[in-house]
Amino acid sequence: LLGAVFLRNTSRTLMRASHEGVVTGVHWEGGATAFSASADRRLAQWDVRTGSRVAALQAKRPILCMDVCEGYAALGLDDGSVCVCSLSPLRLLFSFKAHDSPVSAARLVTVSQLVTSCAGGGVALWRLDEEEGSERRLTRFDGHTAPG
């Protein structure tokens, strides 16, 4: 099923929900709330008991990847941007242009450090605790080449 989200334990399905696009990230710590990201541009918060969507955040572009650390999520978008969100309450904190091509992976190392990669082969390390408008990128690693 396109956009299907299932939460299962060893004996039964706990929740079934859906997005309108391909699901590109999921997060669940075993409690009553789960999160999923999708190419339909939504970061959704789900009630595991009922399977209903509790809240949703609409990104400006399709979400290609997601990582979570200590109540924060980093979303990689298809235009090279990264959105950083709070999960409780679900809200956008800030976004920035990380790459010139789609973000293919995002990893929140800590709540203040992020590593991203892009479809063009670049990898970058970011500081997330910098003031708005300041240079967040610490370094960029080149050397991967995109297929072509």
Image: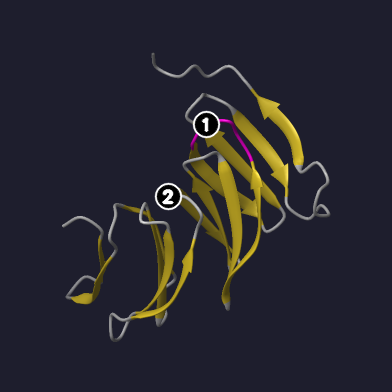
User: Which numbered disc, 1 or 2, marks the residue that appears first in the sequence?
Assistant: 2
Q: Nearer the viewer, residue 105 or 82?
A: 82
Disc 2 packing (10 Å; few <14; some 14–19; many ≥20): many
Above or below 136: residue 45:
below
Q: Residue 86: horizontal and vertical position, in percent?
A: 60, 69
Q: Amino acid at mark 2?
A: Pro
Is 35 above or below relative to 95?
A: below
The question of residue 48 being in magenta is answered with no
- Could you say which is closer to the camera, residue 79 or residue 114? 79
Colouring mode (rainbow / by chain / secondary structure / one colour): secondary structure
Where does the magenta region start and end? 98-102
Q: Residues within 10 Å of mark 1 (few under 14, many from 20)?
A: some
Which residue is located at x 63 percent, y 39 percent? 98
Residue indicated by mark 2:
62
Front-lying residue, 53 or 128: 53
Hey, which residue is sitting farthest top in the picture?
A: 148
Q: Position of residue 72 (x, y in %)?
A: 60, 64
Q: Secondary structure at mark 1?
A: loop
* Left or right, residue 62 beside residue 90: left
Q: Residue furthest bottom?
A: 50
Left or right placement of residue 130 versus residue 61 in this view:
right
Residue 21, picture quadrant: bottom left
Cα separation between marks 1 and 2: 13 Å
Q: Which residue is mark 1?
A: 101
> Where is residue 145 drawn, in percent x and y?
49, 16
Question: Does residue 101 show up magenta in the picture?
Answer: yes
Three-letter amino acid code of the residue under disc 1: Ser
Q: Residue at x 52, y 31 (%)?
A: 101
Task: Name the residue at 59% across, 54% down.
Answer: 83
Secondary structure of the residue carrying tag 2 is: loop
Q: Main secondary structure of the magenta part?
A: loop
